[in-house]
Amino acid sequence: MAAIDGIDPGAVLAEGWADGLVPIGAQPYVGHLRPFGREFPGLSAAGLHGGRPASVQTDALARGGRARIGLVPCARPADAVATIGWQGAINRRSAVELSAVLRSWEDRHGIVLAGLGFATVTLLVPHPPADEAEAHALAAELAALCPDVLAEDGPVDGFGLAGDGTLAGLARLLVGRPVWKLWWD
């Protein structure tokens, strides 16, 4: 857990933004990242946790198959990724880096890890963004962590093609959505 404590989630996301979303070159095309540009916009402000949490359909976590319960000895859901050494995002982020970002989301937005697959992460979002303006900063963080949310649909209900491959499109999809599934190619 000390390794997670030593990681700055903002730095992880800024690196993911630069390495995974901004093309190489002196004048890279970044139209897909509007309203932001080639620089990572920083961590989103802590969400307002007022009101009742969003409800989730009973089959939302096990779509496409059966799910199993995994018990991991850790203090919080985000730490499970690093504790078990999950390698599903290894092409982009280490398990410790992913845990650091997930901790940050738990603290700022109440978003919690609900499932791990071969290369998938399922997150419960008790207070999803209410509008696109609120969702833009969260969309930037999701894309910086998992660039495939802009480019791929994946084997789960991915965001990529449904969001037109843009940050604005992803923000539109996050509004009111209580379950987010990320997939790394």
Image (cartoon, rainbow, N blue to C red):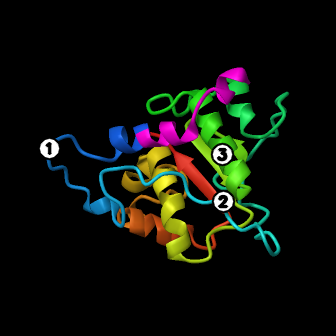
**Neighbourhood count class around disc 3 (C-alpha, 10 Å): few under 14, some 14–19, many 20 upward:** some
Disc 1 is placed on an element classified as: loop
Dot label at residue 171: none
Q: How far apart are the two marked residues, 2 and 3, measured between alpha carbons?
A: 10 Å
Q: Nearer the viewer, residue 98 or 67?
A: 98
The N terminus appears in which quarter of the rendering? top right
Question: Does 158 sit above or below residue 92?
Answer: below
Helix, strand or loop: magenta stretch: helix
Q: Nearer the viewer, residue 171 or 37?
A: 37
Question: Does 40 sit above or below residue 178?
Answer: above
- Residue 76, position in %: x, y? 80, 39
At 26% from the left and 56% from the top, the residue drawn is: 30
At 72% from the left and 49% from the top, the residue drawn is: 106
| Left-right relation of 155 to 67 | left
Q: Amino acid at mark 2?
A: Ala
At 45% from the left and 33% from the top, the residue drawn is: 92
| Left-right relation of 68 to 140 | right
At 79% from the left and 63% from the top, the residue drawn is: 58
Dot label at residue 104: 3
Q: Residue furthest left?
A: 26
